[in-house]
Amino acid sequence: MGLKVPFVTGYLTEHFGDDAFPTLEGYRAKGGYEAARKALGSMTPDEVIELMKTAGLQGRGGAGFVTGLKWSFMPKKGDKPRYIACNADESEPGSFKDRILLERGAHQMLEGILIGAWAMQAEKTFIYVRGEYAHPAACVQRAIDECYAAGILGANCLGTGFRHDVVLTRGAGAYICGEETGLLESLEGKKGQPRKKPPFPAEYGAFGMPTTVNNVETFSHVPHIVAKGADWFRGFGTEKSPGTTIFGVSGHVARPGLFELPLGTRLDEIVFQHAGGVPNGRKVKGVIPGGMSMPILPAGQLDVAMANEFLRERKTMLGTGGIMVMDDTTCMVRASCVITYFFRDESCGQCTQCREGTGWLHKLVTRIERGAGSIEDIEILADVTSKMEGQTICAFADAAAWPVQGMLRHFREDFELHVEHKKCPFPESFEL
Ligand SMILES: Cc1cc2nc3c(=O)[nH]c(=O)nc-3n(C[C@H](O)[C@H](O)[C@H](O)COP(=O)(O)O)c2cc1C
Ligand code: SF4
C-alpha cells in the first residue's frame, strides 16, 4: 500500500526505513520536535525568518521561490488571522516525492509547519492533500491527532502558550488545485479556478485572510535547518540551490524510485548510476528532468547539474524533480500526444489562450501522429505554444506550452518523419 523507501536516503529520509518513525514516539526517539521547541522557546519569529533566508531554502513545489523571503511577506500587523496552506496536491505527472514524505515523515512536515507558524505568527494551517492520496492523508491525520493528544498542536503548543491549529482537507483529483490560488479556491469549497494576482495570497489568501502557501517538502526541510543551522544546510547542494531534494525517477530505467540527493547532482549520475540506466540494452533518447511540465533534454545533454541555475542554461528547469526517462524506441510525437492530452483535460478553462491553446496542441500532435499532418502543422504547433506563454491568469498555460516547445527543439525530426512517411515511423514505441 505504501510507497517504497528511497534507494538513496539523506537527512530528510534517513529514518524512513524505520517502521516506528511515522509515529510520534518513533519521531521523538530521533530528536523530533526538538527544533520546534528551540524555535518557539528561544527564537523570535524574525530570527526564524532570518535563519531561513540565510539558509537559502528554495520552495520545492516547482517554482523554487526562496522560502524565507516568502515568509517575510506575511503582514506582521493587522487584526486578521494569518493562515498557512501546505500544498500536498502533488499532481504533476512524474512526481511522487511528497507522497513518501506524507506517508513516512508526516511529523517532520508538521514540525516544519509549526516552526513556520511561529515565524509568521499564523493561527491555522490547512493541509490540502491530493484526492487520490487516501493512504498518505490517513498517515497525516494520524500524526495530527497524535500532536493534539500530546499538546504539540492546539491552544498551548509545546507548553509555550502559542496557539496553532492544523486541519487536513482533501482535494478531488484536479491538477489545477495544486496551483496555489486554485488550491485556495478549492479549500473554500469553490471550483478550483486560479485567482488573478495581485492581490497575492500573503495579502488575500484563504477565506480572504493573509496566507502563505508552501509545499510539503519545503516544510520538511525546516526542522533540520533550525536544528543544525544555515551553514550546515548550505553544505549540501550548490551555492545558489542549497540542500538536498528527493528525485523521483520513472520510465525506462532499471531501478525506478526515489533518491534523496544534493541539488546539483548530475542528471546522468541519477539516471545511469542511481536508477541503474536503461534496461534491455537500449539507449536513452530523452529525459524530462522535473515533472511533465518541464522541457525534455536529449540524450546528449544529460551532463547537467540538477539545479535551476544550470538547467535554465539548457532551457529547462528542476520543477518537482520528477525525472522521466525515455529510451530509443520512444516516439516523441506519441509522448507529446500523452502530454497534450493531459493538459487539454486539466485546463480550468478561464483563459482563452489556455482553454483553446491546449485543445489545439492536442489536435495538432494527434493529427501528426496519425500521419495526416503537414509541415505547416508543425509550424502552427510552435506558433500556438508561443501565444500561450506568459498570457494567462496562472502558469498552467506555460506549463502546457513548454514541454511541446522542448519536443520541437530537440526532436523536430520525429515530427517531420511522421509528415514524410504519412504514418508513425517508430513501430516499437509504446502504444497510445
Ligand atoms: C498548474 C500548477 C500546478 C501546481 N501544482 C503544485 C502541486 O501539486 N504541489 C505544489 O507544492 N506546488 C504546485 N504548484 C506550485 C504552487 O503554485 C506554489 O508555487 C507552491 O505550492 C509554493 O510552495 P513552495 O514555495 O514551497 O514551492 C503548481 C503550480 C502550477 C502553476
Ligand atoms: S492558465 Fe489555464 S489553468 Fe490557469 S487560470 Fe487560465 S485557463 Fe485556468
Image (cartoon, rainbow, N blue to C red):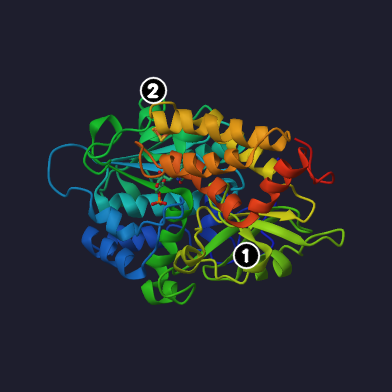
Report, in whole angstroms, how far the alpha carbon at label 2 lies from the one at label 1.
Answer: 38 Å
What's under tag 1, amino acid-wise?
A: Thr
Q: Could you say which is closer to the camera, residue 2 or residue 414?
A: 414
Using the rendered image of the protein, determine whether residue 359 is visible from the camera's viewpoint: yes
Horizontal relation, residue 278 to residue 349: left or right: right
Horizontal relation, residue 256 to residue 217: left or right: right
Q: Quadrant of the C terminus?
A: top right
Quadrant hosting residue 66:
bottom left
Q: Residue furthest top?
A: 190
Coordinates of residue 325 in the picture (x, y in percent): 69, 55
Which residue is under mark 2? 189
Q: Is residue 146 above or below residue 413?
A: above
Coordinates of residue 280 in the picture (x, y in percent): 87, 58
Q: Quadrant of the N terminus?
A: top right
Q: Quadrant of ligand 1?
A: top left
Q: Tell me the number on the disc at residue 9.
A: 1
| Residue pictured at 28% horizontal, 59% vertical | 69
Q: Nearer the viewer, mark 2 or mark 1?
A: 2
Q: Could you say which is closer to the camera, residue 72 or residue 166?
A: 72
| Residue pictured at 41% horizontal, 54% vertical | 112
| Residue pictured at 61% horizontal, 61% vertical | 15
Dot 2 alpha-carbon crowd within 10 angstroms: few under 14, some 14 to 19, many 20 or more = few
